[in-house]
Amino acid sequence: MPVLRFRLSRLRALTGLGVEELEEALFRLKCETEVTEDGEFIEVEVNPDRPDMFIGEGIARAVRGLIGAEKGWERPKVVDSGLRLLVEEVPRRPFIAAAVVYNVNVDEEFLEELIQFQEKLHESIGRRRAKVAIGFHDLDKLPSRELTYRVSHLDTVFKPLDYPREMKFSELLLIDDRGAAYGKLAVDEERGSHPFLFSGDIVIAAPPVINSDVTRVEPGTRSLFIDVTGTSPEAVAQTLDIIVTALAERPGAYVGRVSLEGRAPWQSTPLLAEKLVEVDVGRASKWLGIKLGAAEAAELLERMRFRVEGVEDGTVKVVVPPFRADVMGEVDLYEDMAIAVGYDNIVSGFKGKYHGGDILWEHKVARAFRELAVGLGFTEVAQLILTSPEAVEASGMKELAVEVLNPVQREYSVLRPSILVTLLQAAAYNQYRRKPLKIFEVGHVVYLEEGEPRDELRAGMLVLDEEVSLEEIQAPLYSIMEVLGVKFRALKAEHPLFMEGRTARLVTSGGEVLGWLGEVKPEVLEALGIEYPVAAAEVSLEVLSRWSSRT
Amino acid sequence: MAEKVPVSEGEYRVLKLIAERRFVRGSIEEASRILGVDKSTLASIVYLLRDKGLVDVEEVEEERIEITDRGRRVLAEGLPEERLVKELASRGGETSINELQEILGGETAVALGQAKRRGLIEVSKGIVRLVVDARTALATLEGFKRLLKEAAERGVWEGEGLEEALKRGLVRRVKSKRILLSVKGEPAALLERVEPEASRLTAEMLRTGEWRRFKFRSYNVEAMPPRVLPSRKHFLHEFIEMLRDIMRELGFREVRGPLVEIELFNFDMLFQAQDHPAREIHDSLWIKEPRAADLGRYADLVERVRRVHERGWKYKWDPSIAARYILRSQTTAVSARVLASRPSPPVRVFTLGKVFRSDAVGPTRLPEFHQLDGIEGDYDYSFRDLLNRLQEIASMLGLKLKFKPAYFPFTEPSVEGYVRLPNGRWLELFGAGMFRPEVLEAAGIDYPVGAWGFGIERLAMAFYGVSDIRKLYTRDVDEIRGARFYIR
C-alpha cells in the first residue's frame, strides 16, 4: 500500500489538530500512521482506493470533514485559461487531458509533496505509468499557448528535465533510468516514433517518460499547467480531476480550463466530473445494521465531503465530488456513512447463537489419524507443500508433479506429489537424533491426474533406525486401520520410492487404492542424504474418509 | 536386641550360602568353590560384609615359585646336560664338540658347562668324554628334575637347587596376595544379625513371598530423572484445529476448495480488475503446466462476471485470464465458490487451508501459509452483524479487537481487525467486509453476505510467542516434542 511522508507541522497546520487527534482521525480514514523518531515527519499508509489523500490538501479535506470542522464540498472557481490543445492520433497512448491551477504558489516543502503526489499516483491508478502518466509544468514558462499532442520521430530534440543540454529522445532512452523503465510503454518501434507534447514547436514533455526542462516547476512557481496522458479515457480524466481539486484547495487557488481540439473525446478539461447517487436510507440502514433517519444520513455524508442536493422520501440525493474516484455506486456511500458513525459505535455485541456448525469429515478423519499415530509413538511434523525439484526427482515422481511458473526460490518451486517427499526431508534433518526416529505428517499433496492438477489430503509415516524391517511400519499402520474399522488388503506392487519385493499397495474392500508402504530404496536414501534405512507408508485421507464409517 | 545390620540382596545371598554350607574360614578361592559364587563377585561382596562387621578378611602376602617357559620345555624335553649324557652314552662315551653342536644346537654351551660342573664329563682337544657311567650320571640329575616338576605343580621349591633353577631361568619368584575369609561367630547365627534390603521389588520376590524379608532401600527422590519427551502432534496443527473448533461452536460449517484454483474464483468473481496489482507476476504464483482450465462448465457465471467487470471497471474483460490456473492466493476463493453455488440462506460456512504468495522464505514471510475464511449471509444480515461476529471470534481467542476502516476490492464497507499483543504491539488479525453488490450479482445471489479472512501463522506466532515464522514449521523433532503444551 502507498506510504506517504508528510511534514508533521504542515499536516497539523492544514487540519488544525494535535498529533494524537490527527493519528486517530487518519486511523478512522483507513490510514496507518507513524511519526518519525525526530518528530518532524509523519508516515501515512493510505489505502489505494483513496488517491485523493496522497497529498496534504486531500488529507486535510477528509480529516476536517470527519471531525465536523467542514461539511460538503463546493466546486472551485473555473476560468478559461486561453490555452488550446490540439490532439493528433497517438496510437499507443491516445488520450490526453490538461488543466491549469492558478496561485498554487510552490515553495520548497510543497514541491517535495507535489513530486510525491505524482509518484504515488503513477504507482497506483497509473499502474506504473502504463495506464496514466502525469506532467507538471510552470504555467508562466510555457513557450506558447498553442499546444499539440502528437507522435514524432525518436530523433526529436529537446532538453530533458534535469539535463544541462539538449539531446535526441533516442539518446535519452539509452542513458536515462526513466528512459529504460518507461520507454517501452509508448515507443512505436515500427515507425520509430513516440508521443510528445509541444508548446508551439518546443517539446515540453515526452509522456510517459519525462518532461522538458523548459517548463520546470521550482520554488517560486506560481501557477501550474498539468497534462495527464494514458490509455484509458476514464482514468486520464479522473486523475486530472483528483489533481486539480487537490491543488485548488490551496489558499487563493482557482482552476483554468484548457480547450481540446482534434481527436480528443472532450471539448475541454478538467471535467471536474460529479456523479449523482441516490442513497436509499432504509436500504443503507439495513445494510449497515444501524437505524438512520434521512437528515442524519445526509449529515454523515456531508461530513465525508459529499454534497447533498436534497432529501426526499427517505432518499438522499448525493453529489459525489470529482476526487472520489473510488465511489462506484450506492454501497460505497454506505461505507462512508459507517466511517462517519465510527465502526466502534456500530458493533453491539453478538446476541444470536446458531447450531449446525460442523467440521469436514475428512478433517475429523485426519484428527483421528493424528491421535492414533501419536499413540503409537510417532511425532507430527508440519511442512510446506512447496518443495525442491531435486527432492521430487530423487523420489522418482517428476512426471506427476506440478511446477510453479514463477517461483521465488528454487527450493520452493514444485508442489509435492507425495507427502513422503517432504517427510523424507524431515527424516534427513533428524537422522542423527535418538533412534528409532518415528515421524508422521498430514497435509495436502498436488499432482497431475489425466493432465489436470488436483490436490489430495494424505498422511505419511516413517521409521528410521540402524536397522529397519517392513513390519515396523506395517504394524502401526495396520493397527490404525484396525481401530478405525477400515478393511483393506495388501498387494505386492511397485512404487518409485520403495524396494522391489518390499512394496505393498493397500487396497480397500471396494478396490480403491488407500495407499502404499515399503522399505525405501537405498538409491533414494542416498540421493536425499539419508544414512539410515527407512520404512514408510502413505495413505490417502480422502480415500480413508470414504471408507471410514461414521457409526 | 542389637540393631540389625542392613544388607543388600547380593550380600544377603552370600550370607545365606555361608550359613547353609557352614563355611567358617578359608581363602577366597576355597570360599568361591564351596559357596558356588563367582570369585570376583564374591571378593567385592566380602569387603562390603567386612565393612559391616559380619566377616573378617585377612590379606596375606605370599611368595610362590612359578615355572617359566624354559622350565616347562625342560620338563618336556629333559635338561640339556641330561640330553648330552644320553648322546655320549649312545656314542660309546665320547664324541667331538662339533658333532654335539649339530645335535644340541644353541644349548650346547649350557649342556657342556653344567655337565662339567657336576663332574660328569671332561673336554680335551675338541673331544668330550663321559667320566662316570651313564646311569649314575642321569641319577645325579633326577633330584633336580623332581623339584622342578613339584614347583610347576605346587608353586613351592622344597629342597636344594632353587638358586640354580632361578639362575638358569627355569623358575621365578612371584609375590601374590591371598584373601582369607573368616566368619565372625557361628555361621548359622549370621542371618539373625542382618536385615536384607532390596533396591527393586521384583516379580520373583512377589511370587516367592520373599519380599517379606526385605526392607526396600530409600532413593534420592529429589534427584532428576533422565529427560524423556512425549510423541506429539505438531503445535501449529493443534492451533489450527482449535480454530476449527471455534468456528464449529459458532455454528459454521466447514467447506473446502482446490489449492490449484482458477483466477475466475481467486480474483474475477471477487471483482478484482484484471489489471489489479495483486494479479501481477510478482504477487501470486502460477503453475507451468497446464496453464488454463476450460471455463465451459461455468458459462453463466462467466457471463455475469464479465457484465459486472465491464460495467464497474470500464475495460474489456478477458475470459482467458480468468481461465488461468493459479496457486490460490486467498481462501476467499473458496468463499467465492460457495457463493457461486447459490446456497439458500442463512449461509454460515468457513474454510481453513493453505494459500500461496510470491514471497521468499524469511523471518516474517513464507511462500505458503494458512488462512481462515468465513462468510455469513441472510436477507436481514448487516454490517453490524458482521462486526459483532468478528468481535465474538476475537473474544473466543481471548483477544480484544480494534476496528479500522479498510479497503478491499470486493467488500464495502471494509474493515480490518487489530488486536493488541502482550508486547504492546498491534497485530492485524483479519480483513473483512460486506461483499459488494457486484460480487453478489456475479454469483447470482440476492441477500447480503459478510466475509472475513484471517492469516493464521501470524496469529499462531503471537500465541506461541514466536518471532520467526520459520519456527512454526520447525522440522526438529526434539523441538516439536519438547514444545510447551498450552491447555485451552
Image (tube, rainbow, N blue to C red):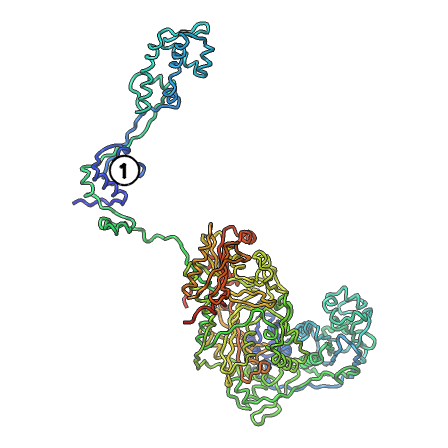
Is residue A13 something that shows in the picture? no
Q: Give the chain letter at badge 1.
A: B
- Compared to residue B112, the image places residue A412 above or below, namely below
Residue visible at 31% across and 16% down?
B160
Residue visible at 66% across and 78% down?
B317
View extreme (left): residue: B1
- Compared to residue A434, the image places residue A289 above or below, namely below
Horizontal side, residue B47 vs residue B453: left or right: left
Q: Position of residue B229 (x, y in %)?
A: 41, 57
Q: Position of residue A347 (x, y in %)?
A: 49, 81
Q: Amino acid at mark 1?
A: Gly
Q: Considering the image in quadrants, where does the C terminus of chain B appear?
A: bottom left
Tag 1's secondary structure? loop
Dot 1 corresponds to which residue? B36
View extreme (bottom): residue: A313
**Residue A410 occupies quadrant:** bottom right
